[in-house]
Amino acid sequence: MFNSAVLILDLYKKIDKEAVLNDFNLTIRQGEIHVIAGSTGAGKTTLLNILAGTVQPTNGTVKIFNKKAGSMEIRKRIGYVPAKPAFYPLMTVLDYLVYMGMLSGLEQTEAISRAVFFLKKVELNTFRDKYPTDISPGMKRKIAIAQGMLSEPSLLLLDEPVTGLEQTGKESILQIIHELVQDRNMTVIVTAAQWTDVSGIADTVTIVHEGRSVLSDETANIRDFFNQGIFLMQTSNNNLLLEALRRTEYLKYIVRSEKDIITVITGQVERLKKDLPGILYKLQLELIFFRQEELNMENVIQYLL
């Protein structure tokens, strides 16, 4: 039995009469890096805000380290880095970090010490006397991560830290995140539009769509899942074919759409291609339509839902 850092049960959040999160369940183990991936509007930022305690859920249970999310005790243990960090234009990088550290409750000398330490960790100590207008978007993300680490949190929330960055910038940010948490037993939740952008540091991944968890598993299993193939087919009697496919041991994901198309998602691509003609012949079925597709974020959501 593992110790959970985050436990979410039947979470529901309504904003302006619209359900942003609906029947959302998630468990995240202590010390792991968990990725929450989904398109804009999927509910990722709202979820982070609920965990950070800045937004209250409409219904459901949200616990962090076995305590209710939003309590002052828990909020002190969380570092939050928004997708678009805001800086004060008249403050240098170092002044900004020291100021934010003092706002979080650090004494000035401790705030200075930690600011310098984390600026070195994100490889921006030489920019400590620069102003926000003098630094690139990638550097701003690194500074925001340093700011999120000032209180040395137990749970770090990073909202789309690599979105919009070129590949070199993404790799640099991911390397920093991995190094910062490696020796601290810190739990990290990272959101992203595409799970593959941050899969290199992820222990587990959850894919969300319209406020619901569509798929959640170990990163290796998610990677294997997306290496599967999709087969779309229609025959002269789909009911018979559906029954036969559901008895086929190696086929796990089989759905039937409203357009009377049978969809099969399988990692046994060549095996299904070899077996299908025999199945059709045995059932005396005519194949009307057949197509193979690759699995991606868009169609996996469509088929799994």
Image (cartoon, grey):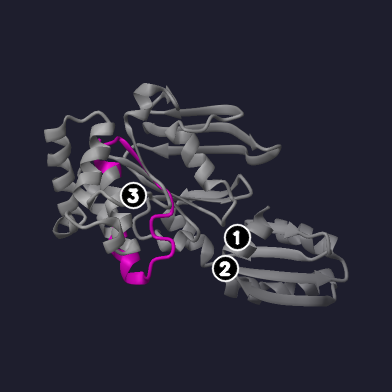
Looking at the image, residue 118 lies above or below residue 248: above
Say the numbered circle drawn on residue 49.
Answer: none
Identify the residue position indicated by label 3 in the image: 87
Q: Earlier in the sequence, mark 2 or mark 3?
A: 3
Q: CA distance from mark 2 to mark 3?
A: 51 Å
Looking at the image, residue 192 lies above or below residue 21: below
Query: Is 159 inside the magenta-drawn segment?
Result: yes
What is the quadrant of residue 98 in the picture? Answer: top left
Identify the residue position indicated by label 2 in the image: 268
Looking at the image, residue 199 lies above or below residue 20: below
Q: Is residue 113 left or right of residue 56?
A: left
Residue segment shown in magenta: 148-174
Say the numbered circle drawn on residue 250.
Answer: 1
| Tag 2 and tag 3, C-beta contact below 8 Å | no
Q: Position of residue 260 (x, y in %)?
A: 83, 64
Q: Position of residue 40 (x, y in %)?
A: 57, 55
Q: Earlier in the sequence, mark 3 or mark 1?
A: 3
Q: CA distance from mark 3 to mark 1?
A: 54 Å
Q: Residue at x 42, y 63 (%)?
A: 197
Q: Residue at x 29, y 40 (%)?
A: 186
Query: Is 87 inside the magenta-drawn segment?
Result: no
Please rate how many residues cluster around mark 2, counting C-alpha atoms within 10 Å: few if below 14, some from 14 to 19, many from 20. few
